[in-house]
Amino acid sequence: MRLEDVYYAAGIGSFIVGLFGLVGLICYALDTRKMRVATQQQEAAFTPCVLLVEDPKDGRLEASLLIKNFGSGAALNIRWRLINSDSWTETSALGAGEVRRTILLIKDVINGEAFECAFESLNGTKYFTRSGFNENARTNDLRHQFRRLPLL
């Protein structure tokens, strides 16, 4: 066997090993993608959504506003404030569907004032909501925005 034959066999062997490595890498990437999609679907099933709303049982302007988790997952590290305010008010965690009264009254925010609320899900994803209040002829018209905060 000549030296060229050994180099030729080594080249074919290296090519086969590299091909198996490439196939393994592609399989690994596909499995990772499947896991990522499954995780995102699972996360979406337990996403919190915290909003400031009026009490549907109490239509008075002197009624206090409620902070409610409309989502299907727990909300942690909840902070809310009026848009024009610099100070945030913190509240304890809210489970799915849980409600808590705030210190603000509907009459205090009826003139187009809006709230911001920042909170986290159980896996640490940060979310942000904005609740706006506008006076309607008969009732309060609530406008809400919900978004996931970008990673910092």
Image: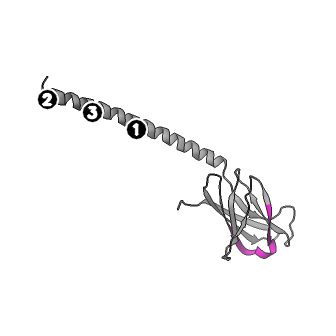
**How many C-alpha atoms fall within 10 Å of the one at disc 2: few (<14), some, or many (≥20)?**
few
Q: Secondary structure at mark 3?
A: helix
The residue carrying mark 2 is 4
Q: Residue at x 87, y 65 (%)?
A: 58
Residue lying farthest to the left in this orientation: 2
As measured in the structure, the alpha-carbon distance from the residue carrying label 2 to the one carrying label 3 is 15 Å
Numbered mark located on residue 14 in the image: 3
Q: Main secondary structure of the magenta part?
A: strand
Disc ID at residue 38: none
Q: What amino acid is labelled 2 in the image?
A: Glu
Chain-order first, disc 3 or disc 1: 3
Which residue is identified by label 1?
25
Magenta residues span 100-118
Residue 87 place in picture, x, y as percent: 68, 74
Q: Earlier in the sequence, mark 1 or mark 2?
A: 2
Q: Secondary structure at mark 1?
A: helix
The answer to which image quadrant residue 18 occupies is top left
Percent position (x, y) of residue 105? 81, 72
98 horizontally vs 116: left or right: right
Instruction: Measuring from the top left, give residue 104's x and y in whole percent.
Output: 79, 72
The answer to whether marks 2 and 3 mark residues whose Cβ atoms lie closer than 8 Å is no
Going by the numbered disc 1, the residue's amino acid type is Leu
Is 108 contained in the magenta span?
yes
Q: Is residue 131 above or below residue 20?
A: below
